[in-house]
Amino acid sequence: MPDRSIRIGGASGYWGESAMATPQLLNADVDYLVYDYLAEITMSIMARAHARDPAAGFAGDFISAILKPHAKAIAAKSVKIIANAGGVNPASCGEAARAVIREQGLDLKVAVITGDNLLGERDEIAAAAPKEMFTGAAFPDKDRIASINAYLGAFPIAKALSEGADIVITGRCVDSAVTLGACIHEFGWSASDHDLLASGSLAGHLLECGPQATGGNYTDWEEAGDISNIGYPIGTVSPDGSFTVGKPEGTGGCVTVGTVSEQMLYEIGDPQAYMLPDVVCDFSQVEIVQAGLDEVHVSPAKGYPAPDHYKTCLTYGEGYRGGTYVSFYGIDAARKAQKFCDNVFVRANKILRGHNLGDYSETSVELIGAESQFGDYAAFHEPREVVAKIAAKHSEAAAIGILLRELTGLGLATPPGLGSFSGARAKPSPVVRLFSYLTPKDSVTVTIDVDGKEITFQDEQGQGFNPAAINRPAPPQNPREPESAVTVPLVRLAWARSGDKGDKANIGVIARDPAYLPYIWAALTPESVAKRFGHFIEGGADAAQIDKYYLPGSHAINFLIDAVLGGGGVASIRNDAQGKGYGQILLAHPVRIPAELAEKLD
C-alpha cells in the first residue's frame, strides 16, 4: 500500500452553489477535486427537465462554470475530477465534457458511470410493489413517478480511475463516494478493508458539503470571519484512513474541532450504523483534535461489511403547493398578521366551494418574529414586526392559484402595517414526495464508459446487517446534584448542527469540553427534546419518536426525530422543511451545571 497521502478538495455541496471553490482549490495543490450536486429533489427536477428535453437532466453548471473556464488549469496541474453531475443523464453530461475538451485541444479522458437510473424498470418495480423502508407505506401510483435511482458506491469510480480517467462523471451515488473512490484507487483498498472504507467515507462525508466544514452554518458563526471569501475544505487522507481537514491559505472561514465535529454529525441517523453501499460505518469512537491553526486531525472510523442492497430513492408527484411571505410592522404586528392569514383562507375556501374543488389538504401559517411556533418558549414582549408565511397543499393547481390570488387580493382590506417586497405573484408548484426502498445489488448492473471503452461492473454482493448486534457504548453517568447549581443555555456548553433525513430531522450536539457532557446528557432527554419540538412533530410531543445516540470519541450526542418536517423537502410547506435551524432551537435548552463549573465558562 502506498505510504503517501492525497489531498482532496471538496468543491461543491449542492446544485447551484457558488463556483468560487474551483480556482481556489486549484491553487492549493490538490490531487483531486470532488463535486456533489445531487439530492432527492434535485433528481426530480432533473427528471422533469429530461422528460422535456432528452439532452437535459444533468448539472449544466458543471460544464459552464467548472470545465469551460478551468479545464486547461485542471490539465496543467494533473488534478483529477470526480462529480455526480450526471444527474439522470450522465451520458449527455459526459458528451458535453468531451466537447469542451476537444474545443480546448486537451488530452483528458472522461469516464461516465451509469446504471443507477431505474426509471426504465418502473413497471417491473411497481409490480413487485416494495414497501417504503422507513414508514411501510404502499408503493405509489407508477404514473406519478418522476425518478427512480439506486445509490451507487465508490468502487465503480475507483475502477474508472484505474482505467486512466481524468474526469469521472456519475449519476446518483452516495455523496461520500466521490471521495472514497479516489482513496480506493490511490491506496488499493479492497472491499474487505472495512475500517479503511469507513474512514474514507467519513472523509467524504466531511468534504461533501463544502464550507460547512470550514465555518459555514457553524454555531460559533462569528469565528468564521470573512465568509465572502470562505475557504473550501481540503482533506489530506493517509493510507491508514486517518486524515486532516484544512482550507487554502488566505481564505476566510475557520477549521476547528467544532466545525468538523458539527459536520460529522450532519444528516446522519444511527452513528454506529451509517449505511453506505460499500460499508456500514461506525463513527462513535472517532476522535477529532485540533492539530494547528485551521487544521483538524480526524482518527480512523470503524467499519462493517457492505449491505446486500442498494438504498433506492423514488420521487413522485402528489398534487401542488403554494404560498408566500408578507410582513406586518408596528403596533400589534403579530395579531394583525394572524388576522390577515385567517381571512385569506376564509376567502379562498369560499371560492373553492364554488368551484367544487374540495378543501386544502394541508395549510400552514407561521409568524416569523413572533415566536408563535415555540409554544411554551414564546417571547414575553410584543414584536413590532413579523413576517407571515402562509401556504397550502391541494390536489389541483387551480386551488393553489386561488389561494395565491386571494393573498394579493386582500391587500386593501387588510389590517394596517402590511408590507411586502415582491415581483410577480407566486405560482403553484408540484409537491414531490420521496419513497425509499431497497434494491438487491445483484439486480443492478453498472456500466463505465471511458471515452468509448465500455466496462461492465458488478459490485460485491455484501451481506445483511443486524443493528441489534451493535455493541453500544455505556452512556455518561448521571452527575450528582451539586450543592450549588446554576442553569445555562446549551449553547454555552455545546455546538450543534441539524439537518434532514426525509421526514426525520437529526440534531448533533457536541460538548465544547468533555467535562460538560454528563450534564448535557442528563438534561437533554428524549422527553425534553420532544417538548421543545412538539409543535413541529406530527401528533405533538406525546406522539414523538426520538432516538438518542452517544458518540464517546467526539463527546457528542445525536438525536433523530421522526415525522417532524411536515413531509420534508418539497413535500413540506414549512418555513424550515429541512430542519436546518433545529440545532439553533435546541441550543436554547436549559442545562443545570455546578456553580463552580459555570464560573469557568468563557
Image (cartoon, grey):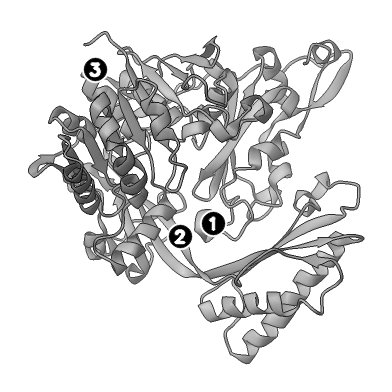
Check whether the beta carbons of the residues at disc 2 and disc 1 lie within 8 A of each other. Answer: yes
- Give the residue at x 59% y 27%: 557
Give the SS element for disc 1.
loop
Q: Which residue does the image show at 54% across and 81% down from the upper left?
A: 398
Q: Which mark is residue 433?
A: 2
Q: Which residue is mark 1?
A: 567
Q: Is residue 483 left or right of residue 566?
A: right
As helix, strand or loop, the secondary structure at mark 3 comes to: helix
Q: Which of the image's four quarters has the N terminus?
A: top left
Question: How packed is label 1: few (under 14 Cα within 10 Å), some, or many (20 or more)?
Answer: many
Q: Residue at x 56, y 48 (%)?
A: 578
Decide which of 585, 237 is in the foreground and name it: 237
- From this view, report whether residue 353 is shown above or below residue 256: below
Circle on res. 187: 3
589 relative position to 79: left or right: right
Q: Which tag, 2 or 1, sits closer to the chain's start? A: 2
Distance Cα–Cα, label 3 vs label 1: 41 Å
SS at mark 2 in the image: strand
